[in-house]
Amino acid sequence: MAGLLAGVVTVVVAATGTGQAMATSAPGQEPVSSHGLDAADEALLHRPARSDEELRRQIALQLKIAPGGRQTARNEVTYGDGTFVVTYALPQQDASTVSPLSAAAVADCPSGWFCFYDGDNYVYPRGKLSDRGWQDLATYGWSDRINSVHNNTNTLVQFIQHLDYGDPANGHSYDYNIFGVSAGSQISHVSPSNAADHVYRY
Ligand SMILES: [Ca+2]
């Protein structure tokens, strides 16, 4: 097993052409997500909590990946003056949606808002925005995290993939639209999923 792992690491290093970055990552170490969390925390962040303790951890994780919000309910964190609100599932409320084989949840975005969900079929956690124009999901810890959407505003909302070819100096010049959701519409599984980084509401 050790020999096999060593072989895999060697191949990866050869493929990247730079052994430097890989050398710091020992075989067996948990992968680090784009949110900078370890694998266990990352997994917890993206699904309905199964207990009050898990819910508390989710709220703490939300504030860790996107500082600046304040907890406004047991399962909710609000940013700005209500610009963005993220809602985590209450454990008892969502027992039926914990299983990936369960029936779809309901698209439940309030009027005047557009919502995006971490799970397919509108399964929480759910983020919501209402402002028009370009907004950066990274501000709220919601990059690469959207799997379904519900637009309950009266205008189109476009979801955008960020692309800078590894050079921040490129800014947003190479960003491109990946899907849109028209006024009053919903999409139970977006494609590509876990990809949107920005939004634009018309
Ligand atoms: Ca992305």
Image: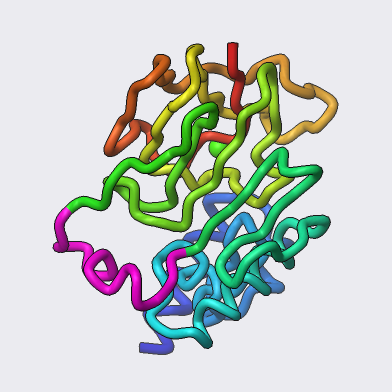
Q: How many marks?
A: 0
Residue sitting at 55 percent across and 28 percent down?
Answer: 161
Corner quadrant of residue 51: bottom left
Indicate left or right for 136 with 51 as reference.
right
Highlighted magenta segment, given as a residue range: 89-103
Colour scheme in use:
rainbow
Relative to residue 19, is residue 143 depicted above or below?
above
Near-viewer residue (169 or 157) = 157
Relative to residue 55, is residue 84 depicted above or below?
above
Residue 85 in percent (x, y) is at 63, 48
Near-viewer residue (197 or 168) = 197
Screen quadrant of the C terminus: top right
Instruction: Say if the magenta span includes residue 25.
Output: no
Residue 119 in percent (x, y) is at 36, 52
Instruction: Say if the magenta span includes residue 99.
Output: yes
Residue sitting at 73 percent across and 21 percent down?
Answer: 172
Near-viewer residue (106 or 40) = 106
Residue 130 in percent (x, y) is at 61, 29
Screen quadrant of the N terminus: bottom left
Question: Which quarter of the rendered image does ligand 1 occupy?
Answer: top right
Residue sitting at 38 percent across and 80 percent down?
Answer: 50
Residue sitting at 63 percent across and 70 percent down?
Answer: 59
Indicate left or right for 62 with 188 as reference.
right
